[in-house]
Protein backbone atom coordinates (compact mmCIF):
# COMPACT_ATOMS: atom_id res chain seq x y z
CA UNK A 1 0.00 0.00 0.00
CA UNK A 2 1.43 3.39 -0.93
CA UNK A 3 0.39 6.63 0.73
CA UNK A 4 1.34 10.14 -0.38
CA UNK A 5 1.12 12.79 2.33
CA UNK A 6 2.02 16.45 2.24
CA UNK A 7 3.38 16.54 5.78
CA UNK A 8 3.98 12.90 6.75
CA UNK A 9 3.50 13.01 10.51
CA UNK A 10 1.89 9.60 10.48
CA UNK A 11 0.42 7.04 8.09
CA UNK A 12 -2.51 4.96 9.28
CA UNK A 13 -3.39 1.50 8.00
CA UNK A 14 -6.57 -0.37 8.70
CA UNK A 15 -5.83 -4.07 8.30
CA UNK A 16 -8.33 -6.81 7.59
CA UNK A 17 -8.35 -7.70 11.28
CA UNK A 18 -9.83 -4.19 11.86
CA UNK A 19 -6.80 -3.20 13.93
CA UNK A 20 -5.58 0.33 13.35
CA UNK A 21 -1.83 0.87 13.29
CA UNK A 22 -0.02 4.16 13.43
CA UNK A 23 3.38 4.48 11.77
CA UNK A 24 5.53 7.56 12.34
CA UNK A 25 8.36 8.07 9.87
CA UNK A 26 11.78 7.65 11.41
CA UNK A 27 13.80 10.76 12.21
CA UNK A 28 16.72 9.69 10.05
CA UNK A 29 16.62 11.51 6.73
CA UNK A 30 17.95 8.48 4.89
CA UNK A 31 15.02 6.27 5.86
CA UNK A 32 12.13 6.54 3.40
CA UNK A 33 9.88 3.73 4.63
CA UNK A 34 8.78 1.97 7.80
CA UNK A 35 7.88 -1.71 7.96
CA UNK A 36 5.07 -2.67 10.33
CA UNK A 37 4.58 -6.23 11.48
CA UNK A 38 1.47 -6.63 13.60
CA UNK A 39 0.87 -10.19 14.74
CA UNK A 40 1.04 -12.18 11.50
CA UNK A 41 0.20 -9.51 8.91
CA UNK A 42 3.21 -7.55 7.62
CA UNK A 43 2.62 -4.24 5.86
CA UNK A 44 4.92 -1.66 4.30
CA UNK A 45 4.09 2.05 4.28
CA UNK A 46 5.82 4.34 1.79
CA UNK A 47 5.70 8.05 2.55
CA UNK A 48 6.85 10.64 0.03
CA UNK A 49 8.33 13.85 1.41
CA UNK A 50 6.96 16.61 -0.84
CA UNK A 51 8.71 19.46 0.95
CA UNK A 52 12.24 18.06 0.53
CA UNK A 53 12.90 17.41 4.23
CA UNK A 54 12.17 20.97 5.35
CA UNK A 55 10.01 19.56 8.11
CA UNK A 56 12.80 17.35 9.45
CA UNK A 57 15.47 20.03 9.50
CA UNK A 58 13.32 22.75 11.03
CA UNK A 59 11.35 20.53 13.36
CA UNK A 60 7.59 20.16 13.36
CA UNK A 61 5.51 23.19 14.16
CA UNK A 62 1.89 23.41 15.21
CA UNK A 63 -0.32 25.54 12.97
CA UNK A 64 -1.75 28.08 15.40
CA UNK A 65 -2.32 30.98 12.96
CA UNK A 66 -5.31 31.52 10.72
CA UNK A 67 -5.16 32.03 6.97
CA UNK A 68 -4.13 35.36 5.43
CA UNK A 69 -6.92 37.24 3.61
CA UNK A 70 -5.83 40.02 1.25
CA UNK A 71 -6.26 41.49 -2.25
CA UNK A 72 -9.74 42.82 -1.46
CA UNK A 73 -11.95 44.07 -4.29
CA UNK A 74 -13.36 46.72 -4.22
CA UNK A 75 -10.68 48.26 -2.09
CA UNK A 76 -11.75 49.28 1.41
CA UNK A 77 -13.42 52.71 1.28
CA UNK A 78 -13.66 52.73 -2.53
CA UNK A 79 -16.39 54.55 -4.46
CA UNK A 80 -17.70 52.33 -7.27
CA UNK A 81 -19.00 54.16 -10.33
CA UNK A 82 -21.05 51.44 -12.07
CA UNK A 83 -23.29 49.44 -9.79
CA UNK A 84 -24.05 46.79 -12.44
CA UNK A 85 -20.43 45.68 -12.64
CA UNK A 86 -19.54 45.35 -8.97
CA UNK A 87 -17.17 42.46 -8.34
CA UNK A 88 -16.55 41.58 -4.70
CA UNK A 89 -13.55 39.31 -4.20
CA UNK A 90 -10.71 38.35 -1.90
CA UNK A 91 -7.62 36.14 -1.97
CA UNK A 92 -6.54 33.82 0.83
CA UNK A 93 -3.51 31.68 1.65
CA UNK A 94 -2.30 29.51 4.49
CA UNK A 95 1.35 28.46 4.32
CA UNK A 96 1.11 25.85 7.09
CA UNK A 97 -1.86 23.50 6.75
CA UNK A 98 -3.64 24.92 3.70
CA UNK A 99 -7.16 26.24 3.19
CA UNK A 100 -10.25 24.14 3.96
CA UNK A 101 -12.33 25.17 0.92
CA UNK A 102 -15.56 23.84 2.45
CA UNK A 103 -15.39 26.60 5.08
CA UNK A 104 -14.91 29.62 2.77
CA UNK A 105 -17.78 32.12 3.17
CA UNK A 106 -18.54 35.52 1.63
CA UNK A 107 -21.11 37.76 3.30
CA UNK A 108 -22.40 40.87 1.55
CA UNK A 109 -24.37 43.25 3.76
CA UNK A 110 -24.84 40.41 6.24
CA UNK A 111 -26.26 38.01 3.63
CA UNK A 112 -24.36 34.82 2.76
CA UNK A 113 -23.67 34.95 -1.01
CA UNK A 114 -21.25 32.02 -1.05
CA UNK A 115 -23.67 29.96 -3.16
CA UNK A 116 -23.43 32.53 -5.96
CA UNK A 117 -19.66 32.92 -5.71
CA UNK A 118 -16.81 31.31 -7.61
CA UNK A 119 -14.37 29.66 -5.24
CA UNK A 120 -10.96 28.27 -6.14
CA UNK A 121 -8.05 27.32 -3.86
CA UNK A 122 -6.79 30.92 -3.70
CA UNK A 123 -9.81 33.22 -4.32
CA UNK A 124 -13.50 33.84 -3.84
CA UNK A 125 -15.47 36.24 -6.02
CA UNK A 126 -19.02 37.21 -6.80
CA UNK A 127 -20.36 39.65 -9.41
CA UNK A 128 -23.39 41.53 -8.19
CA UNK A 129 -25.78 44.31 -9.15
CA UNK A 130 -25.67 46.33 -5.94
CA UNK A 131 -28.03 49.15 -4.99
CA UNK A 132 -26.52 52.59 -4.52
CA UNK A 133 -25.20 53.12 -1.02
CA UNK A 134 -22.69 51.78 1.45
CA UNK A 135 -22.01 48.03 1.44
CA UNK A 136 -20.11 45.79 3.84
CA UNK A 137 -18.33 42.65 2.65
CA UNK A 138 -16.90 39.98 4.94
CA UNK A 139 -14.83 36.88 4.14
CA UNK A 140 -14.47 33.98 6.58
CA UNK A 141 -11.95 31.19 5.98
CA UNK A 142 -10.65 28.28 8.07
CA UNK A 143 -7.45 26.38 7.46
CA UNK A 144 -7.16 22.59 7.73
CA UNK A 145 -6.03 22.97 11.34
CA UNK A 146 -9.32 24.73 12.18
CA UNK A 147 -7.93 28.26 12.61
CA UNK A 148 -10.41 30.96 11.57
CA UNK A 149 -9.59 34.16 9.69
CA UNK A 150 -12.15 36.91 9.16
CA UNK A 151 -11.77 40.11 7.14
CA UNK A 152 -14.42 42.79 6.75
CA UNK A 153 -14.40 45.96 4.65
CA UNK A 154 -16.85 48.53 3.30
CA UNK A 155 -17.24 50.43 0.06
CA UNK A 156 -19.76 52.78 -1.58
CA UNK A 157 -21.69 52.33 -4.83
CA UNK A 158 -23.07 55.37 -6.66
CA UNK A 159 -26.26 55.17 -8.72
CA UNK A 160 -25.78 56.71 -12.14
CA UNK A 161 -22.64 58.29 -13.50
CA UNK A 162 -21.91 61.43 -11.51
CA UNK A 163 -24.63 60.82 -8.93
CA UNK A 164 -22.86 60.91 -5.62
CA UNK A 165 -23.61 59.08 -2.43
CA UNK A 166 -22.16 58.86 1.01
CA UNK A 167 -19.20 60.42 2.70
CA UNK A 168 -17.21 61.64 -0.37
CA UNK A 169 -20.13 63.86 -1.49
CA UNK A 170 -21.95 64.48 1.77
CA UNK A 171 -25.39 64.15 0.17
CA UNK A 172 -27.72 61.54 -1.27
CA UNK A 173 -30.33 61.56 -4.03
Image: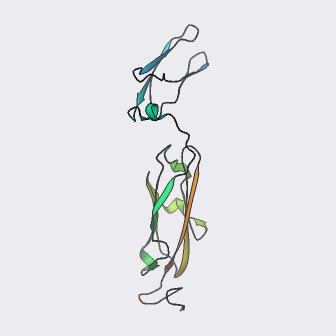
Relative to 73, say whether 157 is above or below.
Answer: below
The number of numbered badges drawn on the structure is 0
Farthest-out residue, front: 58
Measuring from the top left, give residue 137's x and y in whole percent. Answer: 54, 68
Measuring from the top left, give residue 30's x and y in whole percent. Answer: 39, 21
Quadrant in the rendering for residue 87: bottom left
Farthest-out residue, top: 40
Q: Residue at x 52, y 52 (%)?
A: 67
Measuring from the top left, give residue 131's x and y in whole percent. Answer: 52, 79
Q: Residue at x 46, y 35 (%)?
A: 58
Is residue 146 in view from this perspective? yes
Q: Residue at x 59, y 46 (%)?
A: 146
Relative to 125, say whether 3 is above or below.
Answer: above
Determine whether, in the image, residue 97 is placed left or right of residue 20. Answer: left
Looking at the figure, which quarter contains the N terminus? top left
Determine whether, in the image, residue 4 is placed left or right of residue 104. Answer: left
Q: Looking at this view, is 78 or 163 the one in front? A: 78
Relative to 13, say whether 66 is above or below.
Answer: below
Amino acid sequence: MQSTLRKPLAAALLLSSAAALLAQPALAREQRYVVLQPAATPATVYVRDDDHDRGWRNGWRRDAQGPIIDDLTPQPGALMGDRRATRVSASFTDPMSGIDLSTVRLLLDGRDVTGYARIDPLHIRVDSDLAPGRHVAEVLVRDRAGNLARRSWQFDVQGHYGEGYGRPYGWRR
